[in-house]
Image (tube, helix red, strand yellow):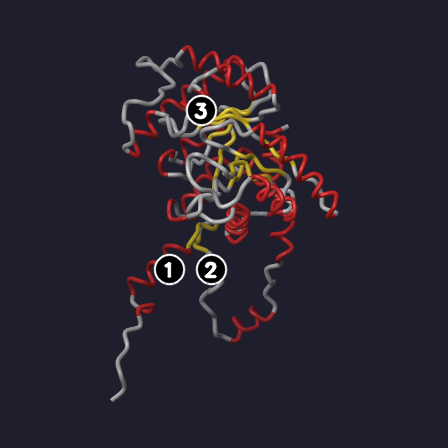
């Protein structure tokens, strides 16, 4: 008698998992994020397969080359061990032809080390016949730099800092969500929804510069009030970070609200267990490619290489039927405009 062996991969529940993970919205029908499409075995179906276009890897290369990873985490960091330091990541990015990388450190200003690494990677590019890559840094206003500290903003700007990220791990909303030091963090607005004076002072300083305001780990109410105030004060460059991250999740309609204020909407690779491709496409459809930028938000050992995150986002859009020129806007042009 033939031995019976349970085939888990054919279990309806397991097959449903694959369907959930691999389906994306494409127009008014579903498209697969895998390459295993249902085969039409009719004569017409076979003839169609015979002449079906092959996915050309050059499309991915042309989009990845010149792209900007708007949010990358490097070591060393007092927060957690990182996969690579800035030198490693900058050389990897230069080798792959990235246009630029924004390095974010949560506890220390990143701009000082970025300036040194820029010199090293420029030399590496010259020695290896590669196009130079642009590196950017800034300061994240957590308690380690004094919280909402105007002097930290000034010091970062004078060294060439590009980003000022609002508090993340020390934001009260972040602490409430993760259950760490609840109520001991930093708020951006008061009980009347007014931006607090210290935060307003920082926005006023930023309006005098070409720095980018990174809005991320605050509550949706705080992010909206701060963005409105920033626009009112004349801040020209604003990015709403990782809207597809559960802690800072925004609905597609909320993303459009921020985009209509002039902010760029950051879609990040992070960890794909946090979101579905349906979520990404809903944001794309609500906002449009003109106000979206892409970032990996990778560097943590659990998440993998940042460049692989960027590749995954680009391939996801390609397989969703998004035109190459729209993807180029999101991964290259918009980030360049935000940073220059």
Whether residues under marks 1 and 2 lie with C-beta atoms below 8 angstroms apart, the answer is yes
Q: CA distance from mark 1 to mark 2?
A: 9 Å
**Upstream in sequence: badge 3 or badge 1:** 1
| Residue bearing the label numbered 1 | 18
Residue 180 drawn at (x, y percent): 29, 31
**Which one is earlier in the sequence, the residue at label 1 or at label 2?**
1
Position of residue 33 relative to residue 241, above or below, is below
Report the disc number at residue 34: 2
| Count of marks, rendered view | 3
* Relative vertical location of residue 294 with respect to residue 226 in this rendering, above or below: below
Question: Is 293 situated left or right of 185 in this image?
Answer: right
What residue is at 44 percent from the left and 24 percent from the top? 166
Q: Position of residue 246 (x, y in %)?
A: 36, 38
The label number, if any, that marks residue 166 in the structure image: 3
Residue 207: % across, % down: 55, 15
Q: Nearer the viewer, residue 222 or 280?
A: 222
User: Tag 2, which secondary structure?
Assistant: loop
Distance of label 2 from label 3 (alpha carbons): 37 Å
Q: For the residue carrying disc 3, how many other residues have a C-alpha within 10 Å: few (<14), some (14-19), or many (20+)? A: many
Tell me what residue is drawn at x 47 percent, y 11 percent.
Answer: 201
């Amino acid at each position: 008698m033939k031995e019976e062996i349970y085939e888990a991969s054919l279990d309806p529940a397991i097959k449903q998992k694959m369907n959930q993970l691999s389906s994306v919205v494409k127009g008014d029908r579903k498209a697969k994020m895998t390459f295993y499409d249902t085969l039409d075995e009719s004569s017409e179906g076979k003839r169609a397969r015979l002449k079906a276009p092959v996915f050309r890897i050059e499309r991915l290369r042309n989009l990845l080359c010149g792209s900007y990873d708007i949010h990358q985490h490097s070591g060393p960091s007092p927060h957690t061990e990182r996969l690579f330091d800035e030198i490693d990541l900058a050389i990897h990015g230069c080798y792959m032809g990235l246009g630029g990388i924004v390095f974010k450190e949560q506890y220390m200003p990143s701009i000082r080390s970025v300036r040194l690494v820029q010199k090293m990677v420029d030399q590496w590019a010259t020695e290896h016949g590669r196009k130079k890559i642009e590196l950017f840094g800034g300061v994240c206003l957590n308690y380690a730099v004094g919280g909402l500290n105007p002097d930290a903003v000034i010091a970062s700007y004078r060294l060439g800092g590009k980003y000022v990220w609002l508090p993340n791990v020390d934001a009260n909303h972040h602490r409430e969500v993760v259950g760490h030091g609840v109520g001991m963090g930093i708020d951006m607005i008061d009980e009347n929804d007014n931006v607090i004076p210290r935060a307003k002072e920082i926005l006023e300083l930023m309006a005098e510069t070409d720095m980018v305001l990174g809005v991320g780990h605050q509550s949706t109410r705080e992010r909206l009030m701060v963005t409105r105030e920033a626009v009112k004060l004349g801040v020209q460059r604003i990015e709403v970070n990782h809207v597809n991250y559960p802690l800072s999740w925004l609905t597609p309609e909320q993303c459009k609200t921020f985009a209509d204020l002039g902010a760029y909407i950051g879609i990040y690779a992070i960890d794909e267990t946090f979101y579905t491709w349906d979520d990404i496409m809903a944001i794309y459809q609500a906002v449009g490619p003109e106000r979206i930028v892409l970032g990996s938000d990778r560097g943590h050992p659990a998440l993998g290489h940042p460049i692989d995150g960027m590749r995954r986002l680009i391939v996801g859009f390609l397989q969703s039927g998004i035109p190459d020129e729209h993807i180029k806007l999101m991964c290259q042009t918009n980030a360049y405009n935000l940073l220059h």
